Structures are given as C-alpha cells and as structure tokens.
Image (cartoon, grey):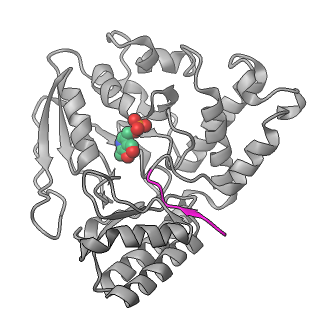
Amino acid sequence: NKVFNFCAGPAMLPPAVLQRAQSEMIDWQGLGVSVMEVSHRDKPFMAVAAKAEADLRELMAIPDNYKVLFLAGGGRSQFTAVPLNLLKEGEQADYLITGQWSKAAFEEAKRFRDVAIAAEIDMSTKPIALPVDIKVRAGAKYLHYCPNETVDGIEMFEEPAVDVPLVADMSSCILSRRIDVSKYGLIYAGAQKNIGPSGLAVVIVRSDLLRDDMQVPCIWDYAQQAQQGSMVNTPPTYAWYLAGLVFEWLKEVGGVAAMEAHNAAKAELLYGAIDSLPLYQNLVDASCRSRMNVVWQLKDESLNEAFLAEAEALGLLALKGHRFVGGMRASMYNAMPLAGTQALVAFMQDFAARHG
Ligand code: PLP
C-alpha cells in the first residue's frame, strides 16, 4: 500500500523529515510546547533560524557577500518584490520567457516597472527548444529568468550569457543540482517543492544589490529584512523550522551533488520509458527537458482518464498535467525515491502493453 506522490507542489517531503517533525510536535526540545508556539525572538527559535541559514549556505556554497532571507508570501510574492527592490521608477529590467512561470513573473513586474521581453520561447515549433538570441537592453538592471518551468517541463541547465545581474526563479529546481551562486545577482524560490511547506520564500541576494532608499512594503523590503534577520514581522516560523529539517536531511544524504545524481537517474529512467513506448510522447528538446517536472502526452488522449485512474489505484498520485497544458506530469523533486519512478515506469509499460 505504498503511495508515491508526484504532485508539482505542494510536493512530497522526505518521510524522515515528517517523522522527526511529528516526534517533536508536542514537546519540542523538552520545552513542553511545539516550535510553532515559541517566540521567534527567543533563543531556541533564533538558533533554529541561524542553523537553517547556515545549512543552506553550506549546501549551496553561498558566498559571504550574499544575504539569505526567509520571507512570507511564497514564490509569487517575489514576482512583485524583485522589481520593487531592484528598480526605481524609470529604471529598466528584462525578462527571458521560457514558459508559464517566467511569463507570469514578467506580467507582474510590468504592472509596476519598465520591463521588456529579452527573448521568448516558441512553443509551436517541435521539439520545443530554448530561445538562443537573448537581447538585453543597454540600461537593464537585471535579466530575470526561470531555470525550471514547472508547468511546461522545460529546464535551462546553463545560465544565460548576459552582462547584467541574473535574477532566477528557482522555485522548482533549487537544491536539485549544483549551481554557482556567484553567477547570480538574486535567486528566489517558493519553498513547497524542494524546501518545505508552501507560503515560505527563500531569497538569496548579493549584498551590493540591496538599496535602502526603495519604496517597498516593509515585509518585502530586502534591505530591511536583511538588517533585521528576516524578522521585520513574525516570520513563518514553522515553515522555517521544517525547511531547516529538510536542509539537515539533505546534508545527511550527501548534499546537492548526491541529489543531482539521484535526480538525473530518475529523469533518465522516465524519459527513457516515454521515448521507447509508442503510446507516449514528450515534445521538449532533449537539451532542455526538466529533471524535476517530466511532462508527457498519451498519443490517444481518450485514454487519459483510464491512465490516471489506474495509476491512482496503484498509489501513483497526482500525475495529471497542469490545467494550462493538459497531458501528464510527474514531479520528481529531491524527496521522490528512485523506487517511485521505477513504480511509475513499470505501470506505464504495463498500461502501454494493454493499450499500445
Ligand atoms: N515559480 C515557479 C517556478 C513555480 O513553480 C511556482 C509554483 O508552483 C511559483 C513560482 C509560484 O509559487 P507560489 O504558489 O508559492 O506563489
């Protein structure tokens, strides 16, 4: 009766983390209360906060000239916070569009500041490939992009080669593979895939990009939050604590390099099945297929419902593609064991044999 949860987010957390959280829930550190009932400004929680930050710094090798913020509001809050913190009125930034999420980030920034599209992916040409000609305006203060498009199943493994600071929405790929943080001006991520519960956002920002004369609502003001240890207001303490447990787990299982190998192996297995079985297809070029979110279609779409129902009966949950794109999607973040992908592939083979 084992269940494998392929939800794109909120996504599965490592069972070891959930068990630990459960064991600590009622009586945390012998205090007789849970972690979510203590002051964020008292020593026990301050230690949790500091340890989570230190572990994240170690896992991602974050250089000292970067601030790490733990903020409320999830991934999308940063669609607004980024332009407001990095651009004054009249200043410009450019956006690379490779799918639904980078498009949404652009649309939100456009409501407040002068932003333009540096290049946009063409989803009508198959296989779908990343745009090559990225045009950044002379005055642009940053280029925003989304290295992993959760909905479209498109991942960009190389940073865009541009001369302005890179701002990356890593909501669905942070900690899944090694990156060189020093190549970025700012990285942000909603937590609910590879970090912890939804509603939390992690922001990693190069200190020289912080400006303390910006008009930003105080809870999203990076400079203020950096000065006050992400505690301008009461932070999402339980989410921060759980993120810390996930970081500890990651260190125990070998860190980001181990996750990279683990994630590559799962993706290879699943894409291999999709490519070899005629019932299925993936239309993304092999160079930019997402390792975290594998999308595919059944060539006979009338079989979609049967596929999903049979999968669910076997404990393979949440395989329905995003409502904007249809088809199927398996999200396989760090916590998804290889056994989950193997069970999915075995089912896909069996289904194909019966319906191929
Ligand atoms: N960016 C990406 C790449 C995402 O996948 C998501 C959510 O799935 C978001 C942003 C939005 O995050 P949130 O729902 O926490 O606002």
Q: Which residues are magenta?
A: 1-8
Q: Quadrant of residue 259?
A: bottom right
Taking the spot 19% from the left edge, 59% from the top edge, the residue there is 130
Q: Taking the image as drawn, is residue 170 in sight?
A: no
Looking at the picture, tell me which residue is in the foreground, 186 or 81.
81
Q: Where is 132 relative to 289, above or below?
A: above
Quarter of the image where the N terminus is located:
bottom right
Residue 30 inside the magenta-drawn segment: no
Where's residue 331, x and y in %?
A: 44, 60
Horizontally, residue 247 falls left or right of residue 87, namely: right
Where's residue 121, x and y in %?
A: 15, 54
Q: Where is 196 relative to 116, above or below?
A: below
Ligand 1, image quadrant it occupies: top left
Q: Quadrant of residue 336?
A: bottom right
Taking the spot 53% from the left edge, 78% from the top edge, the residue there is 342
Where's residue 192, x and y in %?
A: 50, 43
Horizontally, residue 51 falls left or right of residue 75, namely: right
Tell me which secondary structure the magenta stretch mostly adopts: loop
Q: Taking the image as drawn, is residue 201 in sight?
A: yes
Quarter of the image where the C terminus is located:
bottom left
Residue 6 inside the magenta-drawn segment: yes
Where's residue 207, x and y in %?
A: 42, 27
